[in-house]
Image (cartoon, grey):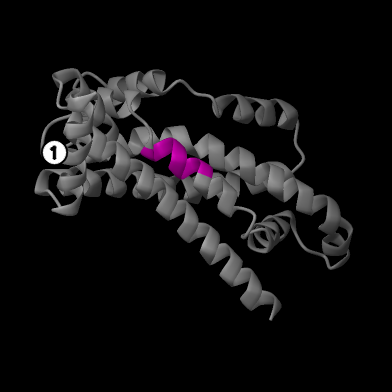
Amino acid sequence: MTDLVEAFHTALRLIVTIDPQLIEIVMLSLQVSLLAVLLAGIVGFPLGAALAVYRFPGRGLATAALNALMGLPPVVVGLVVYLLLSNAGPLGVLQLLYTPAAMIIAQTVLVVPIIAALSRQHCEDLFEEYDEHLRSLGASSREIAATLLWDGRYRLTTAVLAGFGRAIAEVGAVMIVGGNIDHVTRTMTTAIALETSKGNIALALALGMVLLATSVAISGALMGVRRGARRFAYA
């Protein structure tokens, strides 16, 4: 018990004194996860809206597959990305393996289905309300999809939060493609796993507290922006 209390105090000291090693790991984690969510949003939002609006053979199967992909095993994604980026893989010439770029790719693959599936559901709900009105105005399917995304932008904050939560907490995929290299690809989650196995509980605790605080802070910030924007829109 004494060792645990001492480790907790040491962890707090690392945070309060802004330990350089701690900050380096935290900043890399945020850079990788935020970029992954941004890229996933660029792909996922239009994909979800398209599935909500367009009618085509196999749409139900595509929707079911998208929902199933929300539960993609991270280690499988990591393995697939590893095989693609390895020297023997089709993208090996890019030399991205064991770099932050490889970690961003892996996290993007994991987050796209989440954002796309949640976007599809939100847009489909709105589509049921607006379909007749938009069709009467002569809007094309592409215009309808864009309108649904814009009108549902506040609801879609939930998709962004879910995607960020998946990205920032990821361990398996980024460990495989990033290698957990010190000063290069070490993120909060991989560092926590490593430091815990080494017995360095203080640093692991510090990273765990920062990880939790970061998730809460970003979630709170997005929710605050959502509420503020809605008040402004209806003012």
Looking at the rendering, the stretch of residues picked out in magenta corresponds to 162-168
In depth, the one of 100 and 146 nearer the eye is 100
Tell me: 12 left or right of 71. Answer: left
Asked whether the viewer can see residue 176, the reply is yes
What residue appears at the point 21 percent right and 45 percent down from the top-left corner?
12
Considering only vertical position in the picture, is 97 above or below 75? below
Tell me: 120 left or right of 7. Answer: right
In depth, the one of 83 and 200 nearer the eye is 200
* Image quarter of residue 70: top right
Tell me: 51 left or right of 178. Answer: right
- Residue 100, position as x, y percentages in the image: 23, 39
Q: Residue furthest front?
A: 2
Q: Which residue is mark 1?
A: 184
Q: How many marks?
A: 1
In depth, the one of 51 and 11 nearer the eye is 11
- Residue 111, position as x, y percentages in the image: 47, 37
What residue appears at the point 23 percent right and 36 percent down from the top-left corner?
8
Asked whether the viewer can see residue 97, the reply is no
- Residue 96, position as x, y percentages in the image: 21, 34
Q: Quadrant of the C terminus?
A: bottom right
Q: Residue furthest bottom?
A: 235
Q: Quadrant of the N terminus?
A: top left
SS at badge 1: loop
In depth, the one of 175 and 25 nearer the eye is 25
- Residue 167, position as x, y percentages in the image: 40, 38
Considering only vertical position in the picture, is 145 above or below 50? below
Most common secondary structure along the magenta stretch: helix
What residue appears at the point 64 percent right and 63 percent down from the top-left corner?
150
What residue appears at the point 51 percent right and 49 percent down from the top-left corner?
160
Type of amino acid under label 1: Val
Considering only vertical position in the picture, is 53 above or below 113? below
